[in-house]
């Protein structure tokens, strides 16, 4: 007995030590299985199952192995044959614009001037006298028919003003680079009585007020001339801002968007986002670009440095510069004149000296620079300024990831410069789908074929492409942009074979442009963009396999579930 007691004590002690030293088994809070799961990792693998603990991925692989992570508390999601990818990333959009588009008149599907007039007339019925009526989305080049009276390619305000005599109206072009005002709005702005000799005092550098032969404003204000009207529009209220924010979050979740590159926000929006995060309402990850219009804002941020959110919800580490306009409004800055408006080259909407200054400040203070450029001259000028900055501070360019937003029309000589300078093109494929049928009128066949929407040439040169929609310029629907990427067709399925088919993306490239490459464009490829152990549990689930379904069925793909931060935030109702 004297020998047995110590032995038992030793045995018990050894069991306790063994229990303490054994690693505690890790259990999943969510287990997803039962469908095709595209990881978009380095091997482009598919897996049978994914295990999540809280908001992180802890396993990818076979269902048999995944079962080991299951306990009674694990939430089981059976895909039932559906398809899952990493959470989609909107690589260039305007988050509050998305929300406000839900609040104001949404004109994106209007097919004629008459439809715009009808939409405004209906809103007038419920508006108070003197209340502003705002909207966005019209695009004269997409109308089925044009009004008889057109000046410099745009409609005139007369018929609009007839249905809204007591309400100022301002309707932004789909591109956001022009606006259309009625007589009441122009009266408030002091513009309605302009005579031919008096127009000059209302000219704005980087913009254009369209006038008739008598010098009277037609109601169309291009590029920076929009401020002649917009500075008279009442400020948005905190209440409407919160409404718009909540609507934008819901729209993202419904479309499988779990992250959003917000292309240019002012200090007021920064304050709003901080408030929303504090209140637990930031249910889309926002990667924000500071608006380049506000030099004081930029200087303040240069001084305090980038803000990389440890919760990965709201990060500020880039600057957005608006350097030219859009093709639709003939504001894109071109090397040669517009084919359908001789002697007009578009607009330089920001001095190129400021682009170089910002590029230098970005290198000095650790900020990425993202410059809007649609025309070939704007793209060339920005690449030139980036290159000058890189040469001036060569020690700071190891991983700058400077971007050009849109890069829509390039001179052939500038295409390889993106890879040479390591500049990322952030291109919205759906713009090709909606713009290409009429863009040829602006640029002519040669410039279109040699330099417009050059996705495959850029990819083959060695740069990633960040995809998106530029919402609210286009609807936020990522399926439409994916379809445009791989088909080079309009959303009606034309033309047969697609426009310039040699520039199509493969489906793998298109999916990567919406996930891992978009994450790379925000320095976030280590935390999201692929279904990889250790990354955030953001997933998008579809009703069918968009990677294998026939091309003419891609647009039938629907997002049926969105998982954000390890939680289901959207489920499509049957």
Image (cartoon, helix red, strand yellow):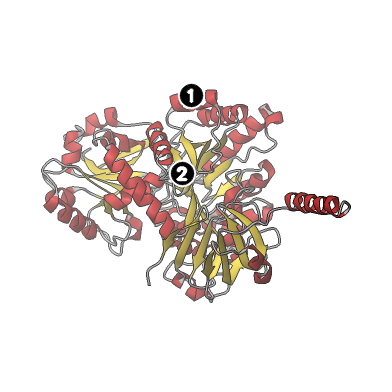
In-image side of 225 versus 267 (left or right):
left
Task: Say which of 295 and 20 sits in front.
Answer: 20
In-image side of 107 versus 572 (left or right):
left
- On the rendered image, what quadrant is the C terminus found in? bottom left
Q: At which x and y percent is residue 454? A: 58, 56
Task: Say which of 532 and 442 sits in front.
Answer: 532
Compared with 175, 491 (above or below) is below
Q: Is residue 181 visible?
A: yes
Say what secondary structure mark 1 lies in: helix
Compared with 86, 213 (above or below) is above
Q: Earlier in the sequence, mark 1 or mark 2?
A: 2
Residue that badge 2 annotates: 262
Q: CA distance from mark 1 to mark 2?
A: 19 Å
Task: Say which of 10 and 101 sits in front.
Answer: 10
Say what secondary structure mark 2 lies in: strand
Residue that badge 1 annotates: 300
Q: Quadrant of residue 266?
A: top left
């Amino acid at each position: 007995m004297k020998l047995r007691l110590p032995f038992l004590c030793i045995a018990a002690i050894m069991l306790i030590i063994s229990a303490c030293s054994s690693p505690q088994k890790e259990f999943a809070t969510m287990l997803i299985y039962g469908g095709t799961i595209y990881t978009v990792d380095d091997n482009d693998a598919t897996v049978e199952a994914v295990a999540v603990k809280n908001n992180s991925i802890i396993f990818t692989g076979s269902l048999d192995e995944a079962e080991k992570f299951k306990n009674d508390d694990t939430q089981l999601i059976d895909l039932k044959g559906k398809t899952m990818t990493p959470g989609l990333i909107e690589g260039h959009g305007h988050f509050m614009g998305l929300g406000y588009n839900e609040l104001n008149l949404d004109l994106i599907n209007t097919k004629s001037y008459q439809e715009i007039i009808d939409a405004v007339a209906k809103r007038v019925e419920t508006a108070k006298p003197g209340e502003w009526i705002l909207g966005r989305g019209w695009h004269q080049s997409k109308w089925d028919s044009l009004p008889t009276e057109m000046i410099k390619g745009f409609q005139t305000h007369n018929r609009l003003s007839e249905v809204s005599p007591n309400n100022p109206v301002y309707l932004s072009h789909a591109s956001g680079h022009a606006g259309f005002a009625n007589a009441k709005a122009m009266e408030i702005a002091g513009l309605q009585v302009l005579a031919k000799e008096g127009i000059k005092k209302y000219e704005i550098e980087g913009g254009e007020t369209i006038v008739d032969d008598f010098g009277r404003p037609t109601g169309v204000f291009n590029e920076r001339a929009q401020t002649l009207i917009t500075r008279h529009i009442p400020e948005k209220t905190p209440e409407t801002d919160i409404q718009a924010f909540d609507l934008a979050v819901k729209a993202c979740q419904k479309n499988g968007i779990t992250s959003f590159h917000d292309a240019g926000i002012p200090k007021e929006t920064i304050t709003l986002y901080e408030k929303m995060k504090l209140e637990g309402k930031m249910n889309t990850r926002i990667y924000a670009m500071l608006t380049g219009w506000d030099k004081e804002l930029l200087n303040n941020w240069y001084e305090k440095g980038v803000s990389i959110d440890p919760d990965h919800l709201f990060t500020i580490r880039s600057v957005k510069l608006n350097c030219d306009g859009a093709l639709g409004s003939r504001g894109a800055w071109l090397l040669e004149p517009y084919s359908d408006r001789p002697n007009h080259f578009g607009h330089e909407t920001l001095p190129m000296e400021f682009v170089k200054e910002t590029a230098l400040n970005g290198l000095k203070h650790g900020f990425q620079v993202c410059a809007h450029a649609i025309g070939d001259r704007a793209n060339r000028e920005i690449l030139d300024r980036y290159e000058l900055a890189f040469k001036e501070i060569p020690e700071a360019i190891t991983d700058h990831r400077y971007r050009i937003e849109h890069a829509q029309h390039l001179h052939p000589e500038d295409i390889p410069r993106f890879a040479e300078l390591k500049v990322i093109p952030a291109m919205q494929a759906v713009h090709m789908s909606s713009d290409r049928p009429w863009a040829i009128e602006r640029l002519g066949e040669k410039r279109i074929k040699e330099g417009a929407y050059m996705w495959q040439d850029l990819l083959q040169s060695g740069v990633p492409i960040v995809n998106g929609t530029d919402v609210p310029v286009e609807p936020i629907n990522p399926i439409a942009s994916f379809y445009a990427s791989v088909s080079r067709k309009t959303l009606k399925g034309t033309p047969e074979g697609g426009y310039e088919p040699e520039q199509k993306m493969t489906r793998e490239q298109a999916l990567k442009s919406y996930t891992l490459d978009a994450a790379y464009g925000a320095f976030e490829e280590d935390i999201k963009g692929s279904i990889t152990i250790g990354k955030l549990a953001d997933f998008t689930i579809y009703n069918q396999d968009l990677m294998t379904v026939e091309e003419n069925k891609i647009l039938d793909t629907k997002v049926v579930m969105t998982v954000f931060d390890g939680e289901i935030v959207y489920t499509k109702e049957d």
